[in-house]
Image (cartoon, rainbow, N blue to C red):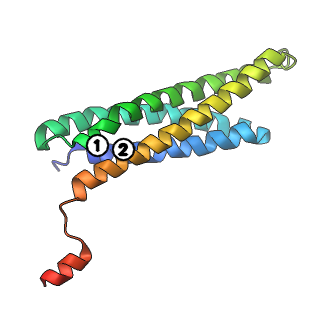
Amino acid sequence: MDLPLHPLIVHLAVVLVPLATILLGLAVFIPRLRDQIGALAAVLALLGIGAFVLAHRSGTELAGLVGVPHEHMRWADPALAVTIVFGSLTAIWYILWLLLRRPSRRSQSGLRTATTTLGLLALASGIAACVFTVLLGHSGGEAVWSNVPTAPSLWRSL
């Protein structure tokens, strides 16, 4: 149907990163939920990396066709970088959590401390990824919709 991939794939990134961050926050702060949603948070965070990479590549290609939205592209690289950090830390946190669950490792306070610290760092990077996602998305929306007349201006023209 000749639609560019970029506007379609960005919505996947916009959903995956905040959802993974929320789930990770719940898993980090509510221990009884870790088994149920820890893996889901890690998988969604990793899928968020994939969605951001695809959005970044497709956006670069689209910019070559329609022009470069400079403000939008200014946020693209930092958003991609922080999303990669978020997804990686979340996956490593979940792997450490799985190791900590083993009965032979439960008494290792160093592993417990590392898991807690990494969970908090992953959550902080997830919050940062959400902030960058909002800034990136807002600038992209402005690039697309800034020349479209608003409803009041449409009524005035009638």
Between 131 and 84, the one lying in front of the other is 131
**Residue that extends furthest to the right in the rendered view of this protein:** 107
Residue 96 quadrant? top right
Sequence-wise first label, 1 or 2: 1
Q: Secondary structure at mark 1?
A: helix
Q: Secondary structure at mark 2?
A: helix
| Residue named by callout 2 | 136
Type of amino acid under label 1: His
The residue positioned 30% from the left and 53% from the top of the image is 141
Residue 40 quadrant? top right
Q: Position of residue 36 (x, y in %)?
A: 70, 40
How many other residues sit within 10 Å of disc 2, few (<14), some (14-19) or many (≥20)?
Answer: many
The residue positioned 30% from the left and 47% from the top of the image is 8
Type of amino acid under label 2: Leu
| Residue named by callout 1 | 72
Q: Position of residue 27 (x, y in %)?
A: 70, 39
In the image: residue 16, left or right of residue 148: right
Between 5 and 131, the one lying in front of the other is 131
Count the marks: 2
Find the distance from the CA under tag 1 to the CA under tag 2. Answer: 6 Å
Q: Position of residue 63 (x, y in %)?
A: 18, 39
Q: Is there any visible trace of residue 97 in the rendered image? A: no
The residue positioned 36% from the left and 44% from the top of the image is 136
Q: Are marks 1 and 2 in contact (CB under 8 Å)?
A: yes
